[in-house]
Structures are given as structure tokens and as C-alpha cells.
Amino acid sequence: MGVAHWDEVDSNHRAKGEMDATWQSLGNAAGTRGVGVNRVRVEPGRLPTPPHSHGASEELYFVLSGSGLAWQDGHVHEVRPLDCVIHRSAEMEHTFVAGPDGLEYLVFGTRHPTELGWLPRSRAIRLGRPWIEGRDDDPWDVEATVEPLAVGEPAPRPANIVNVDEVEHETVRHQTFAYFTPEEKTKLAGLAWEKLPAGHRGSVPHCHSAEEEIFVILEGTATLELWPPDGDVEETPLRPGHVVARPPGTRVPHSFRAGPEGVTMLVYGTRDPNDMAWYPRSRKIAWRGLGVFGRIEALDRLDGEPIEDD
């Protein structure tokens, strides 16, 4: 159904050299397709990964708890809860160094079958699992033998690190949004913080043809509503830690209604210019690449057989 809770997702602990973190693949558990989201908990003073960059993937990080430093091209910057750290493809090497109380974050990323990863310290170029020269060992083993990552004094935070409190909040009806990633900041996907008061609905029921969305409940409770074309509305209760995946092309509209104490969630979505969105209650279609809406007065569903005129 596209719902998982991080208390029920298997953990993978990896510790080599100065790297020590526990990973949970929340996206796989919830059923994402072209994107992913991991929950990462880094031990105090340790790194989650070697410094690295991606040739195609965009990564968006959201700090849940703890403290630490964002290491970016040799400079470090302090991070704290509710920070978003933006890493576009092919721009800078990056990792984190956890503070004395550890560091916990979510990382959202786009998936690409021909992705290249660059690890500058071990000189490893990863193409999927193997790395350069067709070696099938783990470059983390090489990373564990090099000198510890140099960390100087924290520098002022650059534009790719921003907190919920530092982003202008926009209210649409009863929804309050903080957009971390306006279109000039990211190309492939966006991330927003959303807050709904008690009993109110978020975005109206809709589904996408090409865009993929992930929702993570941070605070409060909510009900996920799925609106199948033929059948009753399906309701699923949600609490903090729930992850909802809405892959493209499901033909099943979705919507969220806040519980009695309201709800705060993260909303992640891809930016496919070929996307179309369907709004069943108003019978509207949105064409993203054209920036226009249309309303369908008469509608026949195509379920396998062509529709022919008499």
C-alpha cells in the first residue's frame, strides 16, 4: 500500500575506520521506484560515509536530531535539527561529522541506473556496486586506511544549508509550507516542510502520471486517504515515523487529513516536466510542463481495450 514505519524497517550498521552509522532504507520499505529515502543515525564523532559526490543524483538531507558538521569540499559548517542540506549532482564532495550527541538525518535522493560516484580520498569511481578497474571489493576498506578527515573551524553556513526557521513560511488556505528548494536551488526534486492544523485536509485528492512523492510524518497524527477509481476511500492512520510512498502512474489519488493535534510532515517530490496530475473531485488535469489546468466534462477510463467512436 506504500506505507512503512521506521520502527519496523530493518537496520544496517556499517562501521569501518572513522565511519560508523546505522542505515534504514525507508524508501524501499514503502515501495518507492525512482527515488529513495534513508534514515541515518551517525555515532558521536563519526562519519556516515566517505566524502563523495554523485554524477547524476541529487541528495536532500533533513536533520532530525543531534548535532554535527556538514563537510563540503574541505570546509565545515554547523548543522542542527530542522536543517535542510542541498547537494545537487556533480557539484561538491560532501559528508557529515556527528557531534558529541550523535547525528540523525533523512536523506532523499534520485536514482539513476548509470550513476557515477566519486570518492576523492580513495580515488574510487563507483558505477553502481563495482568501482574502477572492475574491482568488487569495498572502497570503504580503502577509506579506513587513510588519514582521518581534516576538520577545521566551522565556517559561516552557505546557501545550500538552511533551517525551517530561516525559510519564509507560506500559508495557502490552512496549509503552512516552508519550501527548502525553490526551482533555482534544485533541478530534479524538491523538499518542503508542511504543517496542518487539527482536522484539516492538506492538498486535495490527486495523483501523478510521472512525478513521484514521499511523505514523512514528523509530529502529530494524520490519516492517509486513498481514492481508488472504483471503490470506497481507504484510510490509514499515521504517526511520527511513518513514510508514505506515492509512485507515479498508480491512478489512485491520495490526500492527508490532520489528526486532533494537527500534523507536521516532510513532502518530497520529483520535478518531471512531462507530469500530469489528476484531481478526481473537480475533474481537473494539470499539465506541469505547460503550466495549465483543464477540466474534463466527460471521461471514459481506458482499461486495456481501445475506446472507439460509434
Image: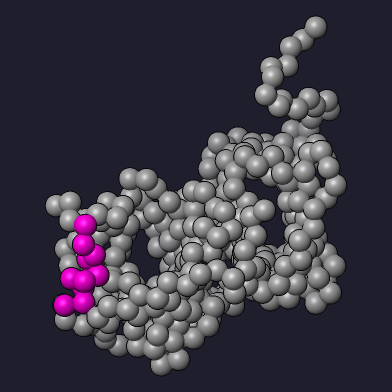
Q: Residue at x 33, y 45 (%)?
A: 114
The answer to whether 301 appears left or right of 136 in the picture is right
Q: Nearer the viewer, residue 91 or 303?
A: 303
Q: Nearer the viewer, residue 304 or 117?
A: 304
In the rendered view, would you say 143 is above or below 306? below
The colour mode here is one colour
**Which residue occupies 72% across, 67% down?**
238
Front-lying residue, 133 or 277: 133
Considering depth in this image, is 228 or 212 the residue closer to the camera?
228
Name the residue: 42% across, 56% down.
58
20 in the magenta segment: no
Q: Quadrant of the C terminus?
A: top right
Q: Position of residue 270 (x, y in %)?
A: 54, 50
170 on left or right of 296: left
Q: Quadrant of residue 100?
A: bottom left
Residue 9: percent from left, percent from top: 55, 68
Looking at the rendering, the stretch of residues picked out in magenta corresponds to 136-145
